[in-house]
Amino acid sequence: MTVRTRFAPSPTGYLHVGGARTALYSWLHARKHGGAFILRIEDTDLARSTAESVNAILEGMTWLGMEYDEGPFYQTQRTEHYRAALDKLLKEGKAYHCYCSRERLEALRAGQMAHKEKPRYDHHCRDLKTPPSGVAPVVRFKNPLDGEVVVHDEIKGAVIFQNSELDDLIIARSDGSPTYNFTVAVDDWDMRVTHVIRGDDHLNNTPRQINILKALGATPPSYSHVPMILGNDGQRLSKRHGAVSVMQYREDGFLPEALLNYLVRLGWAHGDQEIFSLDEMIALFDIKNVNRSASAFNTEKLLWLNQHYIKTSAPAHVAHHLSWHMGRLGIDPAEGPELVEVVKALRERAKTLVEMAEASAIFYKDFNQYEESAVKHLTAQAAPPFSALREGLAGLAAWEPAAIHQLIADTAVAHGLTLGKLAQPLRVAVTGKAASPPIDVTVHLLGREKTRQRITRALAHIEKTAS
Ligand code: GLU
C-alpha cells in the first residue's frame, strides 16, 4: 500500500503554527514512507473562505519547503464528485431527503432541551413514504441506529463512539451544496488517502466520517489526532501570545528550518535530541510517538534554534534569506561586499535575520549620524592616527584582514596608543556605532574606498566639534 497523506486547511486566515505543524507531520509521514502528500483547500464555506487566505497558506507552505505531490485541490471545484457520492447514497437507501421545516426542527429542539435531552433529529423523514410537495429537501445521512464506532487513533489509542449519540447528519443543503463532514469523507475516499493526520479538534467528526466512508463502500483511512498547541499561560495558542502566523516568523527573521525543527519537536521527541536536519526528521519521525497531551509554545527555544541555524547553515543559504530582509530595509546587496562574507562576519552575533540585516546596513549604506553613545570616541587625539591610517590604507598592497590588522596596530604604536585606543574610534568612524564585528574584518568588508571616505568624514567631524 502506498502511503497517501493530506493537509486540508480551510482558507479562513493565514497559515498558523498549529496548521503548519499538522502539515509537517503529514508531510514527514508521506516522505518517510515514500508516499504522496496532497494539499486540499477546504473552501466550501464561501462566507469565510478568501483567495487571500489561500495565497497566504500556499506562501507559508512554500516558505517552509513543504512541497506537495498532488494539488492544490479546491473543494469548490469538486462539486461533481460530491454530487455523484450523494446520488449513490440516495440510490442505495443510505441517505434520504428530509423535508422538515426550520420551525419543526426548532420546536423539536426546544422540547428536547426542556426535557434535558440531547438535541437531535428524530428521524421523522427517515422512512417517509409520501414526500410533501413544493418543499426543497435537504439530504440526511442514515447513520446506523445502534452499535459503536471505534476510532483506532494512532496517537490516542481506541476512542469509542456510540452510534446512538450520532445524528442523521445533513450532508447536502436544500440548494444541493454538500456539507463539511461529507466533503471530507468523499475527498479522503476519492483521493485514496491512507493516513489522516489532523488536529484533535476534529476527533468528534471522525466517527461520522467513518460511517459515511463505510456507507460509500470505502475502507476508512488510519487516523491520528494531534493535540493542540498552548500558549505559555496554558490557554490555546492564539494571537494574544504573539506571532502565530508562519509568515510572521519569516518577517521576524526566522529561518524556515528553525521553525520546522521547532515545530517537529513541539509534541514529538526522539530521545533528548533537539536539532534535526530535514533528513533526520524524515528518518526518525514516527506519528505513533507524538505526545497525547497538548504542548506549550516556547519562543525562547525557537530563538535558540534560529541562532543555531544562522550560525551553522551554509552561508549562501543564510544569505539567500537575508537578502529578502535587506530588501525590506531598503538595502541593496549590490551596493557593497559579497553577502556571503557579510553573513560570515555577522552570524555569531545575530539571533534573527532582522538583526543581521540591520547590522549589515553599515556595509551597504552610509549611516546618517554617529550613535549617541559612540560619538565620544571621536576625539582630537584620534585625528593624527586617522590621517595616517587613511594614507596607509590607500597604499596597502594586500586588502586582507591580517594586513589591515597589522597596519592598525603599527599606526597605534607610532602614535603612542594601545590597539584598543585606536580600534574603537576607528570602529565609530567607519560604522557609526560602538559595536561591530572585529575591526579588521569590518574594514576589509567595507572596502578601501568606503573606509577612507568614512575616515575623512570622521576627521571633519572632529575638526568641527573641536573648534
Ligand atoms: N479543514 C479542516 C481545518 O482546517 C481540516 C479538516 C481535516 O484535516 O480533516 O481545520
Image (cartoon, helix red, strand yellow):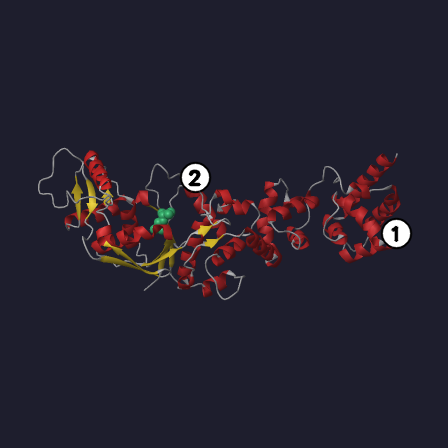
**Residue that numbered label 1 is attached to:** 417
Mark 1 or 2 closer to N-term? 2
Label 1, label 2: how many angstroms apart (C-alpha)?
61 Å
Q: Residue 52 carries which label?
A: 2
Q: Assess mark 2: CB under 8 A from ligand 1? A: no
Give the percent coordinates (x, y) of residue 109. Answer: 23, 39
Q: Are marks 1 and 2 in contact (CB under 8 Å)?
A: no
Which quarter of the picture shows residue 220?
bottom left
Q: What residue type is labelled 1?
A: Leu
Give the percent coordinates (x, y) of residue 79. Answer: 27, 44
Disc 1, SS: loop
Identify the residue shown where x is 62% and y is 39%.
330
Is residue 145 depicted above or below 179 in this figure? below
Given this view, does label 1 or label 2 mark the residue nearer the observer?
A: 1
Is residue 30 depicted above or below 165 in this figure? below
Quadrant for the C terminus in the image? top right
Q: Residues within 10 Å of mark 1 (few under 14, many from 20)?
A: some
User: Between residues 154 and 344, which one lies in front from this camera angle?
Assistant: 154
Determine whether, in the image, residue 104 is placed left or right of residue 435.
left
